[in-house]
Amino acid sequence: MSKKPWDKGISRKMYTEEQIAQRVKELGAQITEDFKDKEEDLIIVCLLKGSIMFMADICREIKLPIKMDFMSVSSYGDDFESSREVKIVKDLDEKIMGKHVIVVEDIIDSGLTLKKVLKLLGSRSPASVSLCTLLNKEVRREADVEVQYIGFDIEDEFVLGYGLDYKQEYRNIPYVAVMGSLD
Ligand code: 5GP
Ligand code: MG
Ligand code: MG
């Protein structure tokens, strides 16, 4: 039996590779401008796993010395939503005290995960903590989180690709797509 097509289950493209690349370039330029005169170190934090593609791309558009670090928080929610409980599975390697931190997310939905991550990072006395998300589902927001850098504001649709998964698959689809029927 051969494998199913890699894009099975996708109903339509939401953002093409070109649109994503253009927006990532703009965000990178904005971050570069905002942090170019700051003396403290800048650490870019990737929240695994959904943010890996966005992280890799945006870091190359930030024309400043940075450190990259990775954090993994567990989610015991179902396949479509995040859980209410957040546990740190992998913490940062870097010390962030006195440093500027930018947390990179794939998508902010309820904001509950980030709220907890931000609280934890804030307790370590960083110089600042900012948030950068590729996608923002404002209509779903439950926790109030301030987001400094937003790629695209989207409606309440379940999206895949460019790092975003459904049951751990589809992360390697190079564009952002809306999920359709799987049969
Ligand atoms: P929240 O903001 O609700 O705490 O959680 C956001 C997380 O839920 C995201 O990082 C992502 O893992 C997952 N999520 C929320 N909306 C979507 C979506 O439309 N598609 C995918 N693949 N994951 C989503
Ligand atoms: Mg995420
Ligand atoms: Mg997921």
Image (cartoon, helix red, strand yellow):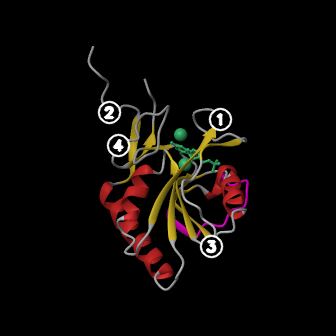
Residue found 63% across the figure and 74% down from its top: 127
Which tag is nearer the camera, tag 2 or tag 1? Answer: 1
Q: Give the residue type that dot 2 points to.
A: Trp
Mark 1 lies within 8 Å of ligand 1 (Cβ measured): yes
Q: Give the residue type that dot 4 points to.
A: Ile
Q: Give the residue type that dot 1 points to.
A: Gly
Q: Which residue is mark 4?
A: 173
Tell me the CA gap for discs 2 and 1: 25 Å
Q: Give the residue type that dot 3 points to.
A: Gly
Which tag is nearer the camera, tag 2 or tag 3? Answer: 3
Q: Earlier in the sequence, mark 3 or mark 4?
A: 3
Label 2 close to label 3 by CB (< 8 Å) = no
- Secondary structure under the numbered disc 3 in the rendered image: loop
- Secondary structure under the numbered disc 1 in the rendered image: loop
**Label 4, residues with CA under 10 Å away: few <14, some 14-19, many ≥20:** some
Give the left or right position of residue 142, taking residue 9 as reference: right
